[in-house]
Image (spheres, rainbow, N blue to C red):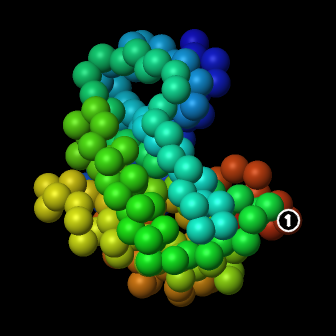
Amino acid sequence: MWARGVMLVFAMVMLGSARAPGRVVVWAWERPEDLRFVGDGADVAMQSGFIVLSGDGVLARGRRFPLQMSGRPSTVLVHIQIDRGRPLAWTPDQRRETAEAVLAFGQAAGANRLQVDFEVRRSERSVLLDLLSDVRRSLPKDKQLSMTALASWCEAETWLDAAPVDEIVPMLFRIGTGGQALKAKL
């Protein structure tokens, strides 16, 4: 039986991924998790950091809950969100501090892949692309850079072509109208 609270992704569309196609990925989000049952049968993606961009500030914290697993995660994930109560300034200092935080959290657990999870509005796409470019520039050459993307971003939008990443992982949850057709297409 799968551990409570673990989201499994059984089929993922990956662009330019070194991961074996069709490999199961177990996601360990922000809660205590015991994934020792997984063994070598799946990859583990572990949330290692959480960043909130608020006005011109950056609030960053690491994982608060323990993760038990055999081996090490293949991916460390940093979740970023914008505080909708304070308009984002996206100053040079904020941009630098955010990239530094992502890179620091990316060093957790010795994973070979760093994934950025950052849902942005259409008007904020340049913020995401700026951040990915800054992280890519400073990421060790032996580490892959990955990003999550809303499934709708992957369907017909071309702005993702500018993302300097090794893979784009569509997130197939909470899909609204047309979701079944989009899942079938992906």
- Residue 20 visible in the shown view: no
Tell me where residue 29 appears, x and y as whole percent. Answer: 55, 33
Quadrant location, the C terminus = bottom right
Q: Please determine whether, in this image, residue 112 is positioned above or below residue 144.
A: above
| Between 153 and 1, the one nearer to me in the picture | 153
- Label 1 crowd bin: few (<14), some (14–19), many (20+), radius 10 Å: few
Identify the residue at image location x=28%, y=32%: 109
Quarter placement of the N terminus: top right
Amino acid type of the residue tagged 1 in the rendering: Thr
Above or below, 50 relative to 3: below
Question: Judging from the image, what secondary structure is the residue with disc 1 in?
Answer: loop
Q: Is residue 42 left or right of residue 64?
A: left
Q: Nearer the viewer, residue 143 or 131?
A: 131
In the displayed structure, would residue 142 be above or below residue 26? below
Let me know if residue 63 appears in the view: yes
Image-based side of 46 in relation to 100, left or right: right
Query: Image quarter for residue 31?
Result: top right
Quarter of the view holding residue 84: bottom right
Seen at 56% across and 50% down, the residue is: 59
Which residue extends farthest right? 177
The residue under label 1 is: 177
Residue 67 at x, y = what percent? 44, 20
Q: How many marks?
A: 1
- The image quarter containing residue 147 is bottom left
Q: Residue 87 in the image: x percent, y percent?
A: 73, 71
In the image, is 44 to the left or to the right of 27?
left
For this rendering, which residue is in front, 151 or 119?
119
Q: Residue at point 28% right, 28% down? A: 72
At 64% from the left edge and 18% from the top edge, which residue is drawn? 4
Q: Position of residue 143 (x, y in %)?
A: 21, 54
The foreground one among 53 and 180 is 53
